[in-house]
Amino acid sequence: MQNKDDVLYSQIDFESALAAKKDILEIERGFLSIMQKIENYQSLRKKEFVIKLKLKNTLKEAKDKMNQINESLPHPNGEKAMKVNKIETEKNFKETKKSKIENDLKEIQAKLEELSK
């Protein structure tokens, strides 16, 4: 074990000490810059959240108003007729889509038969 009298010192020259201090200050500056960017990011995320929330509420209000307007408009055959028309429109769309696919298949089949001759 060492006595208090046997303490060893190491000498650091002035240039090395100055370079070490500069390096430490550069690292501190880097950390502070990173902390500043993190705080800025957090505040932007909060603003984004508030804006998204306002947009969601505005869209909900607009949807509600559109539904109110739609309900207040007179319907020639009533709401049931509208629902039936919607279902028929969907069926027509599906049938049109199926018939288009069937037509495409027939065309491809005809081309294959032509090529096989």
Image: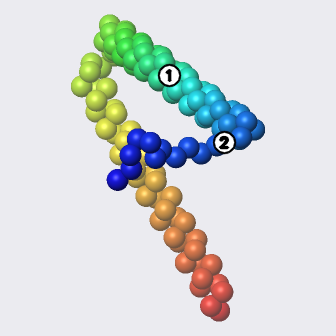
Identify the mark at residue 110; answer none if there is no mark: none
Q: Name the amino acid, label 2.
A: Ile
37 sits to left or right of 26: left
Going from the N terminus, do you reach mark 2 or mark 1 first?
Answer: 2
Identify whether 65 is placed above or below 102: above
Distance from disc 2 to disc 1, alpha carbons, whole Å, reads 39 Å
76 sits to left or right of 7: left
Front residue of 29/41: it is 29
Answer yes or no: is residue 79 visible. Answer: yes
Front residue of 67/35: it is 35
Q: Quadrant of residue 55?
A: top left
Identify the mark at residue 39; answer none if there is no mark: 1
Give the secondary structure at mark 2: loop
| Residue drawn at point x = 75 percent, y = 38 percent | 15
Give the secondary structure at mark 1: helix
Identify the residue position indicated by label 2 in the image.
12
Tag count: 2
Q: Name the amino acid, label 1.
A: Glu
Q: Tell me whether circle 2 and circle 1 mark residues in contact (CB < 8 Å).
A: no
